[in-house]
Amino acid sequence: MKKSITSGLQLLAFCVAASTSAATSSLADGHLTLEGKKIGVAVVGTQHFWDREAFNGALDTVKKLGGEPVPVDGGRDNQVHADNHDILLNNKVDAVISILGDGAVEPKFEALKTAGIPVFTVDHLSPHGINNTTSDNYYMGTTIGRYMADAIGGKGRVAIFNAFEGALRICGIRSGLWKYVLQDYPQIEIIQPELAEAFANAPEDARKKTLDLLNQHPKGSLDAIHVGCWDQPAIGVVQALEEAGRTEVKVTALDGGPETLEIMAEENSPFVANVAQQPRKIGATAAMNAARFFAGETLLPQTFVEVKPVNGPEEAKAVYKELGYGELK
Amino acid sequence: MTSRTAREPRRFGVPSLSAMAGYLPLVIFVCLLGYLSVVSSNFLTFPTFDLILRQAVPTTIVCLGLSIVVMAGGDDVVSGGIDLSIPAVAVLAAAIIADQLTNHAASLAVALPLALMAALLVGAVNAMLVVRIGMTPLLATLSTSVAVVGIVKVVTSSRRINVDHPAVVWLRDGTIGGVSSGVVLTLVFFGVFFFIAHRTRWGLNLQAVGGSRDAAEVSGIPVSRFVALSFIIAGFAGGLAAMFILARGSGSTPGTEENLLLEMVLATFLGSAFSPRRVVTLWGAILGAVLVSALSIGFKSIGVNVFWTGCIKGALILIVVASASLSAKFDRRKTAI
């Protein structure tokens, strides 16, 4: 009897907890609105899957919450992206969601803040922003470090494309922690100088630079190529390896959009590890955070969106399906 | 685009076909700006005008350099004067200043002269290629532009360099008499360029060289020296623009030259539509730069996709060049009759 009462109480407690959690969750989202608000959404470019998805995620959510989005696209030019914030300031928007961008945007954020316009950043931690929505970059950096080290058996020579370590904090975290992990693998040597990929036309630029790298480091003297902050250059890296018949060199990178997961899923692909992000969810979360701010809720400096580690072709296929990109054979 | 030596007599009544073709780009621009004023409620406001001027600063300065080259070489795009390397020179000078200030803790007194020297050196190389070796300016400056972009990548290792030097911050945020410091300084540079080109014997000779090289040679003007100097001045203009590029971007960013090149060519040749003789002038260049900036900001304000904006700018360059060619063709036909 006592046992059944205890079980009954446990069940009741579970039901109460479950209903409270559901109510909180519906309250957390249900009361949010951007009705009557003009929300500027600035993105550095829309050529790449990640940028486009984060942008569309933010735009769709602003619309869903009743707000009027004011979109501006930098055309993959950081300077144009920064200048676009002046236009949003001039258009007297109620808030700005700013996706990516380098140091050129900081004075623009400051000007917006001075004008009383709250800034919600995506993948750009700024002292002038209310909140930054991003992936768990710390986990991404360490995970890809471990996966790459495992892929080459804990020893060998690796090259890294690392142009943005000093320009974007998220890249500093990702490649910094990749290097931190490699400190525990004394037999892995990072080839110096590090490579610098282009911000625009990254696959073609990386293809050429990889062909040069392969000429400088003949078979047996290069074991892996890692792209420190994203994976668009990795498309060109894989192309170059295939052209040169050097697919023994392993490739690792970060972002995990559909096109790179497809490359990873190919048979004998040199592209062995990645960490997939959820850019649409990141953009949508930034818009939700803007609504939470207007509802008077307190936001933490950063909101982290879950990532999906991808180790090998089978996981690439599974994550591809899980993230709703379709099915890979 | 063709060179004209003598000022055309003023005509009244029905405008000629050549005049109509010459003014076509201007008419299209005015229509576009009119449309933007109607569609975007805050387009015709002081803050927008201020923004247009501030964003036009680097383009205006490189346009001043290009105008001098076109004035000296004639405004035929293929065989006349043109310098496509100015934006790359500006980005190189910006990279040198940023590298010196941020990576080597040098003072501006060291960084700026170093950058200006590099800019002048590229100008001198252009001058040598065109005057001594006899290359067409279009190909010569395209080649140096590619080479200079390569040097920029070496200097910066293809990485962004942040700059927070007080002078750069002042150029970005400072004001003189309520007007942006960058805009005021650009007007000063314009004044200096204008004085040199239009109020000095040297400037008049420069224009004579561009108007008709043969006539200038017959008059005893050292044509080659003027053409060479025009490229060096253009390099200097690129060097001047560097500080404003740094101010605009709070640092040096690889790839800035691409957009600057597009806007420079569009603004300079669009500006010729402001001239009664439809030739490239300094006044035209500065107005052209402001118009191009207004158009960019206006399109973004009404939410036009950035790729369409690029497409429209490209089409406008085509219209500007085509209408100048048409205008010249009508002129020739009229002369033949």
Image (cartoon, coloured by chain):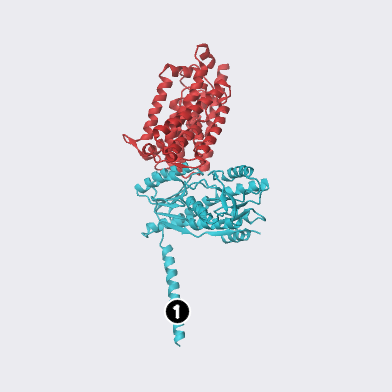
Q: Position of residue A27 (x, y in %)?
A: 41, 65
Give amino acid for label 1.
Gln
Specify the quadrant that holds the N terminus of chain A: bottom left
Specify the quadrant that holds the C terminus of chain A: bottom right
Where B104 sits versus B135, above or below? below
Judging depth in this view, the residue of A265 and B266 nearest the camera is A265
The residue depicted at 63 percent of the width and 51 percent of the height is A249
Please report, as a chain letter, where disc 1 is located.
Answer: A
Which chain corresponds to the colour red? Answer: B
Callout 1 secondary element: helix
Q: Is residue B268 visible?
A: yes
**Chain A drawing hue:** cyan
User: In the image as oriented, which residue stretches furthest toward the left?
Assistant: B177
Number of residues whose C-alpha sits closer than 10 Å to that of mark 1, classed few (under 14), some (14–19) or many (20 or more): few
Judging depth in this view, the residue of B264 and B192 nearest the camera is B192
Q: Position of residue A184 (x, y in %)?
A: 53, 57
Q: Position of residue A196 (x, y in %)?
A: 54, 44
Residue B286, located in which quarter of the rendered image?
top left
Q: Position of residue A156 (x, y in %)?
A: 60, 52
